[in-house]
Image: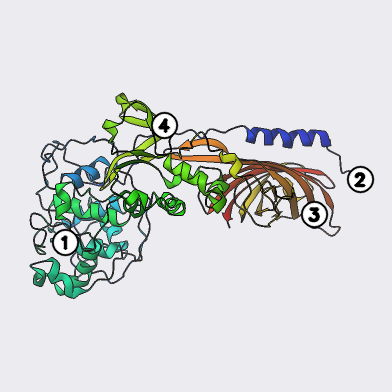
Amino acid sequence: MSSLFRWSSAKVTLLVLGMTAATITPIVISAPASSQTPVPSTTPSDTPSPVTPSDTPSPVTPTPVTPSPTSTVNLSDVSSDYWARPFIQALAENNVISGFPDGTYRPNQPVTRAEFAALIQKAFGNQNRVRQLSAGGFSDVPANYWAAAAIQSAYETGFLAGYPGNVFRPNQEIPRVQGIVALSNGLGLTGGDTSTLTNFYNDASAIPEYAVNSVTAATVGNLVVNYPDVKQLNPQQSLTRAEAAALLYQALVKQGRAQPIASNLPASQYVVAGTPVATDIVSLAASSSSFTTLTSLLKTAGLADTLQQPGPYTVFAPTNDAFAALPPATLQQLEQPENREALIKILRYHVVPGALTASQLPSGKLNTDEGRPVNVKIDSANSQVSVNDARVLQADVKASNGIIHAINQVLIPPDVNISKLNQPPTGNGTPDVNVGRSTRGGRSYIGVGGNIGLSGDDTALSDTNFSVISKLGLTNFISVRPSVIFGDDTVFLVPVTLDFSPRRAGSVGERSFAISPYIGAGVAIEANADTDIGLLLTGGVDLPIGSKLTLTGGVNAAFVDDTDVGLQLGLGYNF
């Protein structure tokens, strides 16, 4: 211990504090802002297979897809009054389907099995694999065939299957029933009373026996679209490109990746309503995986019933990512009974009386239901609308009682102080100690990481080694962060840190991020024969990347026999 301060303690302190100060300074994660959230793109073709897959895939939750707010695709043969235009246009604007080089879509052209496989790959490319195609693949699909990869993907994700004899028949036109079966199987749909099919389809007897269960599940799931007669399935008729677009769109609706077609559009009358779907503002929000936080808060505040009334209302709806960008403890505090008034004010600040589409929104002040105005800005050149500092991601989602505009930030009324929601109780003047709680810097976690040695040669802290990390909140602003760095001279680090409130760090695409700095001191314990103990200084940042995970990085300086400095990076699982 005689060389405890062999390296000047003043220099080490300056290094740690300097790097911590740099982390506390707001960091900008640069990425170009997009006016729309892209959807998986697809080739203009479609075709499922006739055989029901032997493996039933488990449903997965893909990344939510948001249609673009403005029409950017012009398909010359899909007129404004064409029955399937809403399905085709929404998918085309998000690159799920595309037209031909001459600007047409050819909606009445039949779809081949290879084309349908290509559509499935683009629309559901992130689906879990449930089986593996044999090394040789299908005998009639050469390795260099244009859709070979799409066919393999559609097979392995459980959507499509082959025919006996190990053939796929890629150029065969796919019947409507096979397209429905493919989507039903791929999405893992089950349930429904098969005897009720006759209630939905006049030609239910023409449905092949192998397809009855899948068609029933698809019907109950509102996947089936029949034109021109909603009660005529025409199961053996070749699937057209327009019909394929309608089925794909309804499958995305089922996954919560697209909003149901508005009930006031003619296209909605061709969707077979196996299960009645409510289309009020709250029901639409609840049906989308992008608004689960908003839906939960509306129920907590007791406003859900209000927004299901006739209205009409215009709602600027923050996405889940928008709420995630708030200081981590904010949502937990808002859900507490003592903060219900603040929650109601915040939510009502997002509601405007009347149904206003994006083209009807006035530039300037707009009064809200909370009694205070928001500032609307219209950028006509870029077809972009913003409200206060929030950007409209998806405009004009039509509900039966109003309009929803999805936004990328939560609007905070001027009479609500978010920071005060995160203050510790002051009843008896002592902080509320609760090991493992969230702090103002975020939730507690445990995880793994790595250490990069920066200086010294005494402990594992000075080398590149594997580490285990953790954060245990004690009060609203104090935590302990035990970690162990493995190596020839394994070292245990036990710092107590002061956690700062999150600072906005910028955004990537439409997702905003906030960093939570911390600084502290403690002990470093070298696990050798002598078990040396020394002073530890630490500083760094936490970066929540969702409700379950936190990225963390920090600089540690340990004064044991020598002075060791290391940079520790890790990923923690929140609890």
Q: Are marks 3 and 1 in contact (CB under 8 Å)?
A: no
Amino acid, disc 3:
Glu
Image point (68%, 33%), residue name: 21
Out of 174 and 541, give the one closest to the viewer.
541
Is 162 left or right of 34, judged from the image as shown?
left
Q: Quadrant of the C terminus?
A: bottom right
**SS at badge 4:** strand
Q: Answer above or below: position of 284 versus 5.
A: below
How many angstroms separate mark 4 from mark 1 (CA)? 58 Å
Q: First in sequence: mark 4 or mark 1? A: 1
**SS at badge 2:** loop
Dot 3, crowdedness within 10 Å: few (<14), some or many (≥20)? Answer: many
Amino acid, disc 1:
Arg
Give the percent coordinates (x, y) of residue 45: 18, 50
Whether residue 164 appears in this view of the structure is no
Residue under numbered circle 4: 374
Amino acid, disc 4:
Val
Residue under numbered circle 3: 526
**SS at badge 1:** loop
Out of 386 and 400, give the one closest to the viewer.
400
Q: First in sequence: mark 3 or mark 1? A: 1
